[in-house]
Amino acid sequence: MARFTGYQTSAILIFVIAMTILPGLATLAHSPSNFMFLEECKSRLHARCGKEIFITIIKEWSISDRCCMEFVAMGQSCHFALVNKALSSPLFKLNKLDALTKSSEIWNQCFELSQFLSPATSPSSEE
């Protein structure tokens, strides 16, 4: 049976994360329709929840169940588009791969919570 080294495991993890995130990156072209999409996404999330999610991505924190549900209702494509827009800012000095990884983890945790809290009415992970 083959065993993976730490390097191989890291490479596989990066590949999987990249393949999960790449569809969100395709929506980042500067255009009026992209701007409208980002504005629509921002309008789906209360400012308090947006701040809670952002702080969770850049630090150790936790998201309230209410914000998790709102976050999932916003949709995965909105989440990744907003995260990628924030990461593209020259003011953002954190490790982008770490932030994208944490962002995916938070999305998955919130999605699982949404399935647990309301399995019949929660949105799908795909839009």
Image (spheres, rainbow, N blue to C red):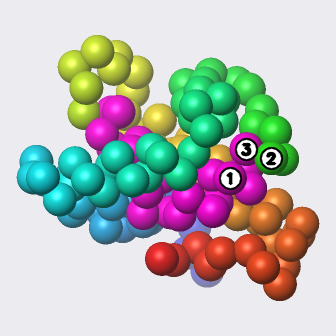
- In the image, residue 117 lies at what x, y percent? 89, 66
Is residue 86 something that shows in the picture? yes
* Gap between marks 2 and 1 measured at Cα: 6 Å
Which residue bears the numbered disc 3? Answer: 67
Q: Is residue 97 left or right of residue 55?
A: left
Position of residue 31 measured from the top left corner of the image (x, y, whole percent)? 10, 52
Q: Give the distance between the C-alpha atoms of the residues marked 3 and 2, in whole angstroms.
A: 4 Å
- Nearer the observer, 98 or 69: 69
- Residue located 43% across and 52% down the image: 41
Q: Amino acid at mark 1?
A: Glu
Q: State yes or no: discs 3 and 1 in contact (Cβ < 8 Å).
A: yes
Name the residue rendered at 86%, 72% in the picture: 118
Check whether the beta carbons of the residues at disc 3 and disc 2 lie within 8 A of each other.
yes
Stretch of the chain drawn in magenta? 67-87
Left or right of 97 on screen, residue 48: right
Q: Position of residue 126 (x, y in %)?
A: 51, 77
Q: Secondary structure at mark 3?
A: helix
What percent of the width, then of the height, locates residue 80? Answer: 42, 53
Q: In the image, what residue type sits under mark 2?
A: Arg
Magenta segment, prevailing SS (helix, strand or loop): helix
Disc 2 target residue:
66
Q: For this rendering, which residue is in front, 14 or 123?
A: 123
Q: Which residue is mark 1?
A: 70
Residue 86 lies in the magenta-colored region: yes
